[in-house]
Image (spheres, rainbow, N blue to C red):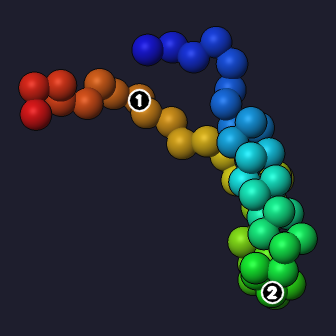
Amino acid sequence: MVLSENPFHEILNKVIQLLNRRRGKKLILLRQYNKMLPNRDKYELAHLYFNPKTHK
């Protein structure tokens, strides 16, 4: 399966939006928010270079 575009930015934006909503409703503390907030420069989408065993 080949992806036409990298879904990483979409996933990252959804995570950030979720954290912002939780922080806005005061469901998480600021220090928790800061620890969970992903850094765009540090993370990358994992790669799968082989076919998993489909018969298992």
Q: Is residue 31 or residue 2 the one in the foreground?
A: 31
Mark 2 secondary-structure assignment: loop
Give the residue furthest to the left: 55
Structural crowding at the residue carrying mark 1, measured as other residues with C-alpha within 10 Å and reported as few (<14), some (14–19) or many (≥20): few
Image label count: 2
Q: Position of residue 45 (x, y in %)?
A: 61, 42
Q: Is residue 53 visible?
A: yes
Q: Is residue 42 visible?
A: no
Q: What's the residue type where badge 2 is placed?
A: Leu
State the quadrant of the N terminus.
top left
Give the residue at mark 2.
Answer: 29
Q: What's the residue type where badge 1 is placed?
A: Tyr
Above or below, comparing residue 29 to residue 16 in the picture = below
Tell me which label, 2 or 1, sits earlier in the chain.
2
Give the residue at mark 1.
Answer: 49
Quadrant hosting residue 53:
top left
Residue plotted at (72% across, 54% down): 15
State the quadrant of the C terminus.
top left
Residue plotted at (68% across, 26% down): 6
Q: Position of residue 32 (x, y in %)?
A: 75, 83
Above or below, comparing residue 25 to residue 49 in the picture = below
Mark 1 secondary-structure assignment: loop
Residue plotted at (43% across, 33% down): 48
Q: Is residue 31 left or right of residue 8?
A: right
Q: Position of residue 30 (x, y in %)?
A: 86, 84
Q: CA distance from mark 2 to mark 1?
A: 39 Å
Q: Is residue 52 left or right of residue 35?
A: left
Structural crowding at the residue carrying mark 2, measured as other residues with C-alpha within 10 Å and reported as few (<14), some (14–19) or many (≥20): few
Above or below, comparing residue 39 to residue 51 in the picture = below
Residue plotted at (64% across, 12% down): 4
